Image (tube, rainbow, N blue to C red):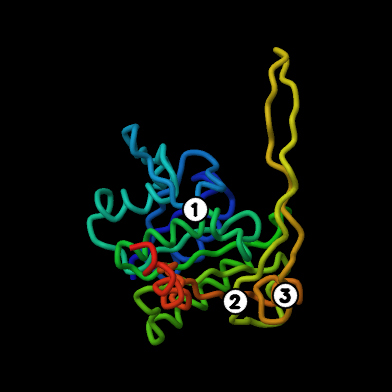
Amino acid sequence: MKILLSNDDGVHAKGISVLYEALSKIADVTVIAPDRNCSGASNSLTLLNPLRATQLENGFYSVNGTPTDCVHLGVNQLLDEEPDLVVAGINNGANLGDDTLYSGTVAAATEGRHLGLPAIAVSLCSKKEANYETAAAVVVKIIKQLSSHPLPKDQIINVNVPDIPLTELKGVKVTRLGARHKADTMTEQIDPWGRSVFWYGSLGSESDAGEGTDFFAVNQGYVAVTPLKVDMTAYETMDAMSSWLEEVS
């Protein structure tokens, strides 16, 4: 098996190194990741500047682009053969609920699916970075199951792992996305030259975190595995919308 491994925390992040070591025991792994932290990059592409890929001493490729750029560049230029699977992570911090819309980790997996490849995004739900090995072990187990249970062609899976030792995990739950309250307002500060600068506020608290959600599973000590569809069409609205749009035409 050949795996393309990327992330949004950057090519030097601990999470991607730990996952590389684990995946290398079961596959031929190529790492292509951003040269810096690209958290929150979502599915953005670098269109106005050239992309450069530099191979580091450890064999990883460092790219001056986004997670989406890295996967696209890998599949179309850097790899001699098309990979069998795209894996993104291990992200430093959760990608739960509506956070997935902003996540560069999820976006890297989504780009793999856009290119016709099965894909997994994985995140460690903590900022302490204590148990990346737990998340890596979970991903290896999931990948081993994919050969006999392939993903639908329009889906990826988003995996969120509690930051606890592997022996303390309660199990795995298939979940839906939860939701947060809106984030705190942005804050203004003054730089040394007297100019205003602005920072995003903290994440909103959980607003939909009941049983069945990814938030609930992680909070209870379970791995949350959420299948995500790339097609965002609101099919349930189409008939009603067609009716009132008749008066527009």
Q: Residues within 10 Å of mark 1 (few under 14, many from 20)?
A: many
Observer able to see residue 183: yes
- In the image: residue 211, left or right of residue 83: right
Per the image, label 3 sits on a secondary structure element best described as helix
- Distance in Å between CA atoms under marks 3 and 1: 25 Å
Point out which mark residue 7 bears.
1
The quadrant in which the C terminus is found is: bottom left
Work out whether residue 160 or residue 57 is closer to the camera in this orientation and state it: 160
Work out whether residue 50 or residue 28 is closer to the camera in this orientation and state it: 50
Q: Nearer the viewer, mark 1 or mark 2?
A: 2
Per the image, label 1 sits on a secondary structure element best described as loop
Q: Nearer the viewer, mark 3 or mark 1?
A: 3
Q: Earlier in the sequence, mark 3 or mark 2?
A: 2
As shown in the figure, which amino acid type bears the numbered disc 1?
Asn
In this rendering, the answer to whether 129 lies above or below 3 is above
Point out which mark residue 176 bears.
2
Query: Measured from the top left, where is residue 158 in percent x and y?
Result: 53, 69
- Distance in Å between CA atoms under marks 1 and 2: 23 Å
Q: Which residue occupies the extreme front position in the image?
A: 247
Q: Which residue is mark 3?
A: 216
As shown in the figure, which amino acid type bears the numbered disc 2?
Arg
As shown in the figure, which amino acid type bears the numbered disc 3?
Phe
In this rendering, the answer to whether 247 lies above or below 194 is below
Q: Which residue occupies the extreme bottom position in the image?
A: 148
In this rendering, the answer to whether 225 lies above or below 76 is below
Query: Measured from the top left, where is residue 227 in percent x and y?
Result: 50, 75
The quadrant in which the N terminus is found is: bottom left
